[in-house]
């Protein structure tokens, strides 16, 4: 198993090695030591490998991830797994703002809390946060699922296009055009599979579902006087 | 952009290492603010005396001024020269006379005053600035520092942080305020004076004015949530304490860490990685619009 100590090896060298991995690589399990809050750890990986990072990371960890499983045994800074395409990113601690921003696919699991703008502009990513999320989470969300076992801050789902938001705790307020929707069997099934994938045992019926009222999709002529 | 660091010691045995630890934190934040840097260090006090931090391009002028006043009053005025800054210990009963003499010397600026606070700031790369002032040799109970990437006013020594508008009080700011001109006018009407047209100095003035009105540090910070509009992460130092506040939208990043030996603030976690015992620290992101205060009792 390759072990890369970032107190000895430059970050660019680590990321370069990860980018050179081929689909049939035998180096399928990496350990990264001493990240010391550095930004852009394990960004842009496109290979079916597991990368375990031992410690807190800075901004954009595992950004643009494809296929890889990135596990952070610590906290993550802003934009963890931003623009992820596939694979899985698991943060064992807390995540800062804009976790999973613009993600197109894959699964992001955060064991602790995520702060503001979690899942901002999400485009197909699934996000499971076992703690709470901050304000403006799922802002302008377009596709995918955001599951929050704890509470959601102000303006959840503001200006949401689509995407399903499931919250187990309290929602401080809903943003523009975000409404509560019925939790039907198809949603229960999606939620159950996401909770199972994240290793969470919560009861699906303890969640409420939110989504788009779709009233902002088109200009409404009655609003013409507002402009 | 800008970078902020702050360190408040709970364990007095770390006091001799305060400057060294802060210098390391400040150096990591060079990339966030390469224009200029500054820091405030809260050290030991001498009863009955105030510390004045004075600045001049020719620090010899400050030393001459101190010698003149010492001779005129027939007293000792212990002082230390740190590059362009000189810290002088003045008996409280002679402070007005001393400041009158400073006012007669236009090339000499008062950077800060207080029983325990010393402030140093200059234009240049933050790690060079820290080195010029000998930050790593300074001791104390708490300290805050700032690395600046200017947005709202010119890159000058006066425009560098921390800003102080009252004894033992200073503030560093990451962000930009949109209503600083209105607030500045109100504060000038209330009797405060400002040295620059910088938005952050207005925030410092606001906190000073409220504390002068009798507000606690926590109440003054809470009041600034209502009065100040814009983006901000503030770290404020007082003689006995240290406070942190982020705007409700949380535009600017912030990380805090705490152990039983210290509480630390960093714009990024990278700034905290060399603190003793950081691997076992509780690390969290300060909640937007929540006032955090630590005070020594």
Image (cartoon, coloured by chain):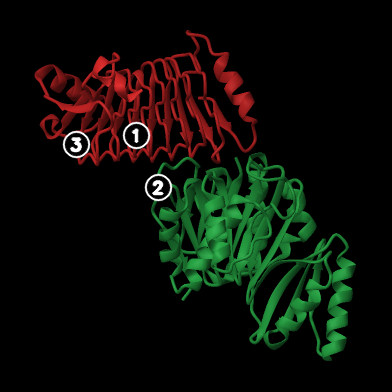
Chain colours: A red, B green
Label 1 sits on a secondary structure element that is loop
Q: Secondary structure at mark 3?
A: loop
Q: Which mark is residue B288?
A: 2
Locate the N terminus of chain B and report the quarter of the image it occupies.
top right
The residue that disc 1 covers is A136
Cβ atoms at labels 1 and 2 below 8 Å apart: no
**Between marks 3 and 1, how big is the CA–CA gap?**
17 Å
Q: Give left or right: position of A119 versus B228.
A: left
Mark 3, chain letter?
Answer: A
Cα distance, mark 2 to mark 3? 22 Å
Judging depth in this view, the residue of A195 and B148 nearest the camera is B148
Q: What whole-number distance in Å separates the C-alpha atoms at marks 1 and 2? A: 12 Å
Chain name for mark 2? B
* Mark 2–mark 3 CB contact (< 8 Å): no
In this view of the protein, which residue sits in the foreground, B200 or B31?
B200
Picture layout, residue B275 above or below residue A194:
below
Report the disc number at residue A168.
3
Q: Is residue B211 above or below residue A89?
A: below
- Specify whether residue B7 is in view: no
Asked where in the image residue B165 lies, by quadrant, the reply is bottom right
């Amino acid at each position: 198993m390759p072990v890369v100590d970032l107190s000895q090896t430059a970050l660019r060298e680590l990321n370069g090695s990860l980018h050179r991995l081929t689909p049939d690589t035998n180096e399928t399990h990496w350990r990264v030591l001493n990240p010391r809050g550095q930004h852009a750890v394990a960004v842009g990986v496109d290979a079916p490998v597991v990368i375990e990072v031992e410690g807190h990371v800075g901004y954009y960890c595992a950004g643009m991830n494809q296929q890889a499983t990135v596990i952070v045994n610590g906290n993550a800074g802003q934009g963890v797994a931003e623009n992820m395409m596939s694979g899985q990113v698991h943060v064992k601690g807390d995540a800062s703002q804009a976790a999973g921003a613009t993600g197109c696919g894959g699964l992001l699991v955060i064991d602790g809390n995520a702060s503001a703008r979690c899942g901002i502009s999400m485009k197909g990513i699934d996000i499971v946060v076992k703690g709470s999320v901050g304000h403006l989470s799922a802002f302008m969300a377009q596709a995918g699922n955001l599951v929050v076992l704890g509470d959601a801050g102000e303006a959840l789902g503001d200006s949401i296009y689509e995407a399903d938001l499931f919250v187990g705790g309290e929602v401080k307020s809903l943003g523009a055009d975000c409404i509560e929707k019925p939790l039907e069997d198809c949603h229960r099934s999606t939620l159950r599979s996401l909770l199972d994938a994240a290793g969470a045992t919560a009861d699906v019926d303890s969640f409420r579902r939110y989504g788009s009222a779709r009233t902002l999709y088109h200009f409404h002529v009655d609003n013409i006087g507002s402009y | 952009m800008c970078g902020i660091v702050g360190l408040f010691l709970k364990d007095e045995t770390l006091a001799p290492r305060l400057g060294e630890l802060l210098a390391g934190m400040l150096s990591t934040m060079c990339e966030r603010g390469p224009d200029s840097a500054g820091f405030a260090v809260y050290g030991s006090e001498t009863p009955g005396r105030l510390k004045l931090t004075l600045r001049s391009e020719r620090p010899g002028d400050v030393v001459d001024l101190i010698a003149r006043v010492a001779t005129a009053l027939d007293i000792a005025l212990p002082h230390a020269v740190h590059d362009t800054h000189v810290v002088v210990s003045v008996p409280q009963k002679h402070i007005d006379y001393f400041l009158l003499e400073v006012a007669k010397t236009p090339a000499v600026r008062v950077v800060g005053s207080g029983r325990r606070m010393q402030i140093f700031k200059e234009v240049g790369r933050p790690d060079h600035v820290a080195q010029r002032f000998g930050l790593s040799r300074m001791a104390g109970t708490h300290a805050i520092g700032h690395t600046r990437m200017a947005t709202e006013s010119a890159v000058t020594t006066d425009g560098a942080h921390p800003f102080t508008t009252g004894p033992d009080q200073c503030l560093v700011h990451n962000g930009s305020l949109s209503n600083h001109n209105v607030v500045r006018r109100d504060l000038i009407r209330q009797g405060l004076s400002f040295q620059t047209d910088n938005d952050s100095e207005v925030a410092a003035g606001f906190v000073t004015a409220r504390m002068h009105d009798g507000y606690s540090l926590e109440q003054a910070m809470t009041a600034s949530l209502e009065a100040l509009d814009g983006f901000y992460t503030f770290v404020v130092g007082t003689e006995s304490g240290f406070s942190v506040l982020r705007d409700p939208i949380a535009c600017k990043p912030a990380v805090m860490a705490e152990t039983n030996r210290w509480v630390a603030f960093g714009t990024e976690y990278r700034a905290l990685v060399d603190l003793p015992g950081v691997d076992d620290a509780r690390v969290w992101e300060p909640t937007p619009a929540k006032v955090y205060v630590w005070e020594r009792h």
